[in-house]
């Protein structure tokens, strides 16, 4: 064998004279074929004034010095053409096309046609890819075309709480996003700054129902709220916010569950730091004989800090954080008849939200507050007081709102007042009387005429009122006697 099998480099033979000639010939072949970059691949005749070392792929139908060497490599070296037969697998860079080609044994084809590229760690097209943006494209447009029929762009996520979406940015700051963002419902969101997001549209994954949480549409009234005091604005007990022991009410209709709770209110923003707050609702108040086997949706506004765990009757769900109305839908069990417990608890850490709403149906509708007199009347079905709105029951030196009359009877039983309510309470309440001047419950009657305090008897308690009597012969006829009270018929 006088030369190598692949590049045909000549061997220096034993005892050969002028070894440098053979060596130089091998170097010349290496210079022609290694790191192959050719000037052109479309010429069938040699160019008139090739540069020293210039290489060409000879086009089919060659003539002249290239005749009979179609698809071979021609190199202009030392004033003559050196011709080399192409071998399958050789790569060449075409300078005038800026293209990489490969010889497949019958033709020079684009290197991209040699087979599929699999498991590439990243690809940058006119851009630099990185570990997050593993495919980066910088171009005026990007075309994804069909292959004879339709075409789908698929964005797949690992789990329901992950995100699969298209994000639109300005200067790499998000401005609009649509897709499955944090759950399996379809969302359309917008942002003025890339950090604060507003949900414009939500499509429920189960029903296809569309909600527009930040848009009011004429003629489409929001569904009624089955929660009373869902915005926590009615506060007859004058709860200052903070810790609540198990079973103790703070804001009207909301009490702490068995483990207690810590809840505060600033404006319309509720902060639930720990524990669980609970409301027991009576479906019949809103015209429902029962909510058993009914699909209901609980929503809150602008949930932040984490997810909100909810329990409605026997069913549990999670509302994920986000701006606008955030919701979860459950179908109540067949045994969820009668009164229904609604519980709210942070999944972990403190959460903030506003305007809680429970409604029948598979999707959340816009929040709409009831008129304050209507909301207060609903609260007073369960709890009411005579004290002014901002005064806590039992406060001393607080006479405004107290009930009483001038005594008329001369025996030892003096009738203070009959209390009657226009709106019946849910049931006969527990009535507690307070002394307007001292706050005492043991001597809740105050004679403003004699400046004396007296015990009282609460009698004939019903859904629409009760009587208050004082048993004291020390009260003379004509004296003015007063008392405060609370009436509690909470569930």
Image: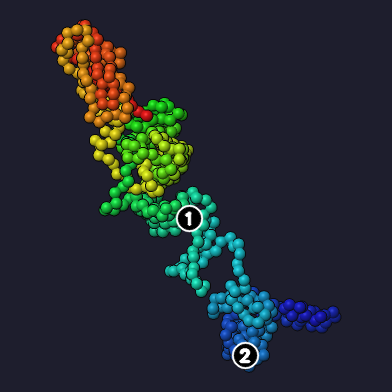
Residue at 39% x, 26% y is 248
Image quarter of residue 398: top left
Q: Earlier in the sequence, mark 1 or mark 2?
A: 2
Residue 395 vs residue 357, the one in the foreground: 357
Which residue was labeled with disc 2?
Answer: 62
Image quarter of residue 141: bottom left
Pair 1/2: label in front? 1
Q: Secondary structure at mark 2?
A: loop
Of the 4 image quadrants, the one containing the C terminus is top left
- Location of residue 390 in the rendering, given as x and y in whole percent from the top left corner: 26, 28
Residue at 31% x, 47% y is 222
- The numbered mark at residue 251 is none
Density class for disc 2 (Cα within 10 Å; few <14, some 14-19, many ≥20) is some
Residue that sits furthest to the top in the current view: 473
Residue at 51% x, 67% y is 125
Residue that sits furthest to the front in the current view: 289
On screen, residue 413 above or below 467: above
- The numbered mark at residue 164 is 1
* 196 left or right, relative to 106: left
Image quarter of residue 472: top left
On screen, residue 7 above or below 179: below
Residue at 26% x, 21% y is 466
Residue 355 vs residue 83, the one in the foreground: 355
């Amino acid at each position: 064998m006088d030369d190598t099998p692949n590049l045909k480099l000549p061997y220096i033979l034993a005892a050969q004279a002028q070894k440098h000639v053979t060596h130089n010939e091998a170097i010349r072949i290496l210079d022609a074929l290694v790191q192959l970059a050719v000037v052109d691949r479309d010429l069938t005749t040699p160019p008139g004034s090739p540069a020293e070392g210039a290489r060409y792929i000879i086009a089919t139908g060659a003539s002249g010095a290239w005749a009979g060497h179609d698809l071979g490599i021609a190199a202009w070296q030392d004033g003559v053409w050196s011709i080399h037969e192409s071998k399958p697998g050789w790569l060449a860079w075409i300078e005038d096309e800026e293209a990489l080609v490969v010889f497949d044994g019958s033709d020079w084809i684009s290197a991209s046609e040699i087979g599929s590229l699999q498991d590439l760690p990243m690809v940058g097209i006119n851009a630099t890819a990185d570990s997050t943006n593993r495919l980066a494209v910088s171009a005026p447009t990007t075309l994804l075309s069909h292959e004879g029929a339709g075409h789908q762009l698929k964005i797949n996520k690992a789990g329901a709480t992950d995100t699969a979406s298209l994000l639109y940015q300005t200067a790499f700051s998000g401005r609009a996003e649509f897709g499955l963002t944090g759950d399996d419902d379809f969302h359309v969101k917008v942002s003025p700054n890339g950090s604060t997001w507003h949900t414009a549209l939500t499509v429920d994954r189960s029903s296809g129902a569309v909600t527009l949480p930040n848009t009011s549409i004429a003629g489409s009234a929001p569904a009624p709220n089955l929660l009373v005091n869902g915005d926590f604005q009615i506060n007859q007990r004058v709860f200052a916010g903070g810790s609540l022991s198990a079973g103790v009410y703070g804001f009207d209709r909301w009490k702490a569950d068995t483990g207690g709770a810590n809840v505060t209110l600033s404006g319309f923003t509720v902060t639930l730091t720990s524990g669980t707050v609970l409301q027991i609702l009576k479906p019949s108040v809103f015209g429902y004989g029962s909510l058993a086997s009914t699909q209901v949706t609980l929503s809150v506004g602008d949930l932040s800090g984490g997810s909100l765990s909810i329990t409605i009757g026997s069913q549990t769900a999670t509302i994920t954080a986000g701006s606008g109305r955030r919701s979860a839908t459950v179908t109540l069990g067949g045994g969820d008849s009668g009164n229904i417990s609604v519980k709210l608890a942070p999944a972990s850490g403190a959460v903030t939200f506003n305007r809680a709403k429970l409604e029948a149906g598979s999707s959340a509708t816009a929040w709409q507050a009831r008129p304050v007199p209507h909301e207060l009347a609903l609260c007073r079905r369960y709890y009411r007081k005579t004290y002014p709105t901002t005064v806590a029951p039992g406060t001393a030196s607080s006479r405004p709102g107290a009930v009483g009359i001038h005594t008329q009877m001369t025996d030892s039983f003096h009738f203070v007042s009959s209390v009657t309510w226009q709106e019946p309470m849910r049931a006969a309440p527990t009535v507690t009387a307070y002394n307007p001047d001292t706050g005492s419950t043991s001597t809740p009657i105050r004679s403003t005429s004699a400046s004396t305090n007296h015990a009282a008897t609460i009698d004939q308690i019903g859904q629409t009122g009760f009587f208050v009597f004082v048993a004291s012969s020390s009260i003379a006829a004509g004296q003015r006697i007063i008392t405060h009270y609370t009436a509690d018929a909470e569930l």
